[in-house]
Image: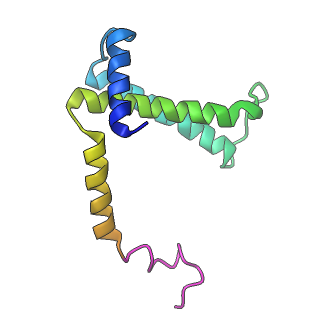
């Protein structure tokens, strides 16, 4: 699925199942909530936080994928509501990063520990 297809799919879902978009402020709050859920799982799967005894680590990676999809869904909702073409925005953003960071990361000793000093 392309980004444009995802934007259309979400819009179709909202208009047929979701009834209507939540307002932009509500969706922004929901986005923060979903990002927090991703952060919580990342801290437990890859960080130093431990799972509670009632939580199952075996389902955590599947849960992480689902939470990331929730983030993407709400972000797409916000893009649709505000008229943002995410494909164009992503292309423009990558061009900006490429121009800005063309040499920066290659010259970063933290990223290239074997680099001659």
Q: Position of residue 37 (x, y in %)?
A: 54, 32
Q: How far from the left and from the top, in percent, is residue 28?
A: 34, 29
Q: Position of residue 92 (x, y in %)?
A: 25, 54
The kind of secondary structure the magenta stretch mainly shows is loop
Start-end of magenta stretch: 103-117
Q: Residue at x 51, y 79 (%)?
A: 109
Q: Measured along the vertical axis of the image, is residue 105 above or below residue 82?
A: below
Q: Nearer the viewer, residue 13 or 66?
A: 13
Query: In the rendered image of this protein, does residue 97 appear above or below residue 106?
Result: above
Tell whether position 105 is magenta: yes
* 94 sits to left or right of 108: left
Q: Quadrant of the N terminus?
A: top left
Residue at figure coordinates x 45%, y 33% from the top left: 71
* Magenta segment includes 88: no
Residue that extends furthest to the bottom in the rendered view of this protein: 117
- Relative placement, left or right, of 87 versus 44 is left
53 sits left or right of 63 in the view: right
Percent across and percent down for residue 45 are 68, 43
User: Which residue is more in the foreground, 45 or 85?
Assistant: 85
């Amino acid at each position: 699925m392309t980004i444009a297809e995802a934007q259309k799919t979400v819009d179709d879902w909202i208009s047929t199942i979701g009834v209507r978009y939540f307002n932009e402020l509500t969706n922004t709050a929901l986005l923060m909530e979903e990002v927090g859920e991703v952060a919580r799982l990342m801290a437990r799967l890859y960080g130093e936080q431990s799972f509670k005894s009632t939580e199952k680590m075996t389902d955590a990676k599947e849960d992480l994928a689902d939470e990331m999809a929730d983030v993407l869904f709400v972000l797409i909702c916000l893009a649709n509501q505000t008229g943002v073409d995410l494909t164009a925005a992503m292309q423009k953003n990558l061009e900006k990063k490429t121009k800005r960071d063309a040499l920066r990361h290659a010259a970063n000793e933290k990223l290239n520990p074997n680099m001659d000093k």
